[in-house]
Amino acid sequence: MRCKTHLNEEGVGIGSALCKRLLQEDAGVRLCLACRSMQKASATKAVLLAAHPAAQVTLVRLDVSSLESVLRAASEIQRRFQRLDYLFLNAGIMPNTHVNFKALISGLFSGKAVHMLSTAEGLITQEDFITADGLQAVFETNFFGHFILIRQLEPLLCCLEKPSLLIWTSSSNARKSAFSLTDYQHSKGKVSYSSSKYATDLASVALNKYFNKQGLYSSVVCPGLVMTNLTYGILPSFFWKLLMPIMWIIRFFTKTYTLTPYNGAEAQVWLFKQKPESLDALMKYHSCISPMGKNYVESRKMDVEEETAETFYQKLLELEKHVLARLNAPLSPK
């Protein structure tokens, strides 16, 4: 199996574009779409098969906001496949979003407009909630559900003779200031999305430390600013109508305004073509676009301390032990 893709939790977006691009790169790639909505997954499969009739596309139901769903999906994947070469971790939510319109309007007419619109720093907050697993929803959906899936699928991912690659979708909104080791689920803050994406960066670094010697590697990508259902849900539609002309103008001055899912998937496709062992564990790979519309990838060192990554990883293992014991599930398949 050449890859496995998660579609965005808020609708078809980068995940769908990624599948199309992977088949363009290698028509023989075998895709497994692990999605919450089987209706949307089936629609994506139909589109893929219309363009590539011989493609092998498998669907698995997976809701990363439910650990029971994660365990069922992992079990099904193990029954269907002998190994995984790529695991794209792409699901995400940003619930109950609130926008600081005063900061937005004042920022548009300041020298920080590009930075503000590229990172949403100081603009967006979320009202999080607790899932049925007793976890913060954004933490579980954007990060921890993926982490448990990886742990359950270790037998299919770890192979020294043929290394596998985890590819996490992070964000330019992943900020150290939003994350705390004493509240890594971000139960007390209002920027849970940013915290969850920084958790992704930390975990990727830690996973490389423990699993590179077993043939499993981890990398992080940033798709840039991409207009998907997740993005459109942040502001009322009339605001987007006002902002879109400005955004297209700003695109000529910043390389991270990828805007379309096709462009946003550039870093993921680039990683698909690399040897996992050749990648830098401390780098985040950004999808970029030139003023003339040429896609390319730029690597930037993550603002991550390896000691913090290690401490966080140990906390994750303790949390894993606790939640799986409650579900009477093994820590990893035998």
Image (cartoon, rainbow, N blue to C red):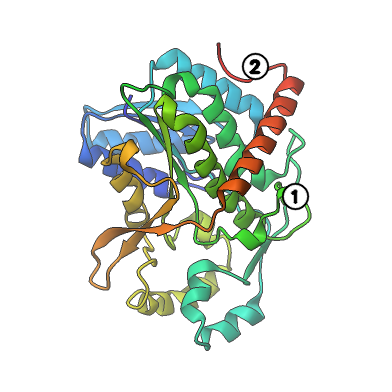
Would you name the residue on which mark 2 appears? Answer: 330
The residue type indicated by label 2 comes to Pro
204 vs 53, nearest the viewer: 204
Would you name the residue on which mark 1 appears? Answer: 183
Q: Position of residue 164 (x, y in %)?
A: 37, 30
Looking at the image, can residue 238 be seen?
yes
- Which type of secondary structure does the marked residue at label 2 adopt? loop
The C terminus sits in image quarter: top right
Task: Classify residue 24 as left or right of residue 254.
Answer: left
Q: How many marks?
A: 2
Of all residues shown, which one is farthest toward the front?
A: 307
Residues under labels 1 and 2: Cα distance? 26 Å
The N terminus sits in image quarter: top left
Name above or below for residue 105 compared with residue 27.
below
Q: Position of residue 239 (x, y in %)?
A: 54, 74
**Residue in view at x 40 percent, y 37 percent:** 43
Q: Position of residue 193 (x, y in %)?
A: 62, 55
**Residue in view at x 66 percent, y 42 percent:** 311
Q: Who comes first in sequence, dot 1 or dot 2?
A: 1
- Which type of secondary structure does the marked residue at label 1 adopt? helix
The residue type indicated by label 1 comes to Asp
Residue 330's image quarter?
top right
Residue 133's image quarter?
top right
Residues marked 1 and 2 touching at CB (< 8 Å): no
Task: Classify residue 330 as left or right of residue 36.
Answer: right
313 vs 324, nearest the viewer: 313
Q: Is the residue marked by circle 1 packed among few (<14), some (14-19), or many (20+) residues within 10 Å?
A: few
